[in-house]
Amino acid sequence: MNDEHFMRLAIALARKGRFYVGPNPMVGAVIVKKGMIIGRGYHQRFGGNHAEINAIHNAGEDIAGSTLYVTLEPCCHEGKTPPCTDSIIKNKIARVVIGTIDSNPLVSCQGIHSLQNCGIEVKTGVLEKDCRHLNEKFFHYMETGLPFVTVKYAQTLDGRIATATGESQWISSAASLKLAHQLRAEHDAILVGRKTVDKDNPELTVRLIKGRNPLRVIVDSELKISPKAKVLQNISKAPTIIATIKKPGDAKFKRLASSGAEIITVKADKKGQVDLKILFKVLAAKNISSILIEGGAQIITSVLKNNLANRIVTVIAPKIIGKGIEAVGDLNIRNLDLAKILSIQKVTRIGNDIIIDSRLK
């Protein structure tokens, strides 16, 4: 069996942590000795043991002289856990095969050098494209300093996210709602506009699958959110931020701060709304590596207009309603050459709905 075979197994293990590890990357590890797998592990939750340590603990025999396959370069610094390189060296692993180098400046290539300096053979770049795609959110965050942004919306076949009167529950099927909760669990934060909160009164939590609740971010420039909104009534379920252009001295600011939500003041854009570019930088500084945007149309349009989105997940329901609310408003594109170009990654069917998962080029 070759290195790619064992790396594929490590990638499959890594995916098991997708709903729990952010903002850390998903990592899987396999220990092989004399052609046999003797240890397996993956990063199970943020703050917990890394994949390499779990694989070492899982090994049923002496791992001296073995080969470790790991999807991401082992860490060599003290964080929430001790350096993985120390355990690899201590246990006399002879060879380490790495999927991709870590973009974190605290690790990048330094983990490799630590192992090589102790006489351990290191091979890198095995299924590198797959390993980077596995953690596209993490790499984007590390390499740009901004969160990876996913826009998700459900629409009818004729491109409406709601009727002319604003009714939107439910355009998609119950099966597609489960996908929405999966997306919530695999992002560090979920963001919506205040109008979406007013109209749908969502909880913005993960309920249909097992997974962590993301940070909830409500964009509310004028602080008009109702104090009776579910996101303020169930504040203990998930940390909640309200982003506004209002200052701390404002009466509304003080009233909402008493709800337990964190209120942050963000500079206004040219339209007098919260500047999303600045907001995303603020969230990145809070260790938020990925954001899921669930609406509404004004937020989606602003994100696309300002080139802040990386991924779009579109749920298309086999329904036609005619006049209604469009998912995306005016992007001021008057020439087809300026159209946003998408790279379709995957098209699937869930129930009667079609799911298009794409990336913005």
Image (spheres, helix red, strand yellow):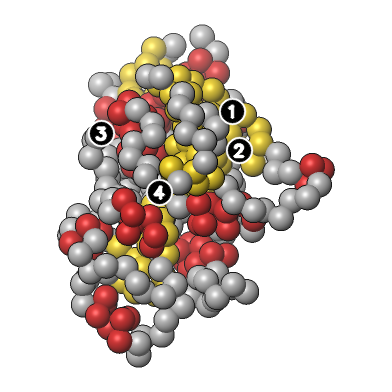
Q: Which residue is mark 2?
A: 359
Q: Is residue 75 visible?
A: no
Q: In the image, which is nearer the foreground, mark 1 or mark 4?
A: 4
The answer to whether marks 1 and 2 mark residues whose Cβ atoms lie closer than 8 Å is yes
What amino acid is found at the position of numbered circle 2 in the picture? Arg
Label 1 – label 2 distance at C-alpha: 7 Å
The answer to whether marks 3 and 4 mark residues whose Cβ atoms lie closer than 8 Å is no
- Foreground of the two, 108 or 134: 134
- Please tell me which residue is depicted at 25% across the width and 51% down the height of the picture: 203
Mark 1 or 3, nearer chain start: 3
Image quarter where the C terminus lies is top right
Image position, residue 255 (x, y; %): 24, 80
- Foreground of the two, 7 or 143: 143
Mark 2 or 3, nearer chain start: 3
- Please tell me which residue is depicted at 26% across the width and 75% down the height of the picture: 256
Q: Is residue 170 above or below residue 33?
A: below
Image position, residue 290 (x, y; %): 46, 50
Q: Residue furthest top?
A: 1
Mark 1 or 2, nearer chain start: 1
Numbered mark located on residue 166 in the image: 4
- Please tell me which residue is depicted at 45% across the width and 27% down the height of the picture: 319
Label 3: element kind: loop
Label 2: element kind: strand
What amino acid is found at the position of numbered circle 3 in the picture? Ile
The answer to whether marks 1 and 3 mark residues whose Cβ atoms lie closer than 8 Å is no
Q: Is residue 156 above or below residue 187?
A: above
Label 1: element kind: strand
Q: Which residue is mark 1?
A: 345
